[in-house]
Image (spheres, rainbow, N blue to C red):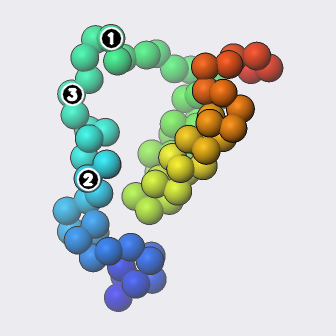
């Protein structure tokens, strides 16, 4: 019933999403980046979201990055 309400597969509630599990792998030293300010706030909000909403947000961010160029830092503050 909860899976229907959240519109996700029941196995995701039991075992998590495959892509989510990859996020919890041990990062290498090169992968670790210190965040503060706005980035820290965004990460805090993201981490508080349920798995289904995280997946949607990742899709939105990836789409935005494709549309506007993910390596273009122009206009960031």
Query: What label sits on residue 26 in the rendered view?
Result: 3
Q: Is residue 49 in view?
A: no
- Circle 2 residues within 10 Å: few <14, some 14–19, many ≥20: few
At x 43%, y 16%, the residue is 33
Q: Is residue 74 found left or right of 7 in the rendered image?
A: right
**Where is residue 73 shown, x and y percent of the image?**
69, 17
Judged from the image, the secondary structure of the residue bearing numbered disc 1 is: helix
**Which residue is drawn at the image coordinates 40% and 84% (left, top)?**
4
Alpha-carbon span between mark 2 and mark 3:
15 Å
In this rendering, the label closer to the viewer, 2 or 3: 2
Identify the secondary structure beneath mark 2: helix
User: Where in the figure is residue 59, as x and y percent of width and height?
Assistant: 53, 50
Q: Marks 2 and 1, Cα distance to the nearest angstrom? A: 23 Å
Indicate which disc, 2 or 3, sits on the residue closer to the N terminus.
2
Quarter of the rendering occupied by the C terminus:
top right
- The alpha-carbon separation of the residues under discs 1 and 3 comes to 11 Å
Mark 1 surroundings within 10 Å by alpha-carbon count, few (fewer than 14), some (14 through 19), many (20 or more): few
* Residue 68 spot, x, y in % from top left: 71, 32
Name the residue at the bottom extreme: 1
**Would you identify the image quadrant in which residue 13 lies?**
bottom left
Residue 74 in sight here: yes
Q: Please give the name of the residue rendered at 62% of the width and 34% of the height, measured from the top-left corner.
A: 65
Q: Residue at x 28, y 66 (%)?
A: 12
User: Which corner quadrant holds the N terminus?
Assistant: bottom left
On the image, the x and y values in percent for residue 21 come to 25, 46
Disc sitting over residue 7 in the figure: none
What element does badge 3 sit on? loop
Residue topped by disc 1 = 30
Disc 2 target residue: 18
């Amino acid at each position: 019933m909860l899976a229907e309400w959240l519109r996700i597969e029941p196995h995701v509630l039991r075992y998590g999403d495959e892509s989510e599990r990859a996020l919890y792998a041990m990062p290498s030293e090169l992968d670790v980046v210190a965040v503060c300010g706005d980035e820290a706030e965004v990460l805090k909000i993201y981490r508080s979201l349920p798995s289904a909403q995280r997946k949607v947000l990742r899709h939105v961010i990836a789409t935005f990055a494709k549309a506007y160029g993910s390596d273009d830092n122009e206009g960031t503050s």
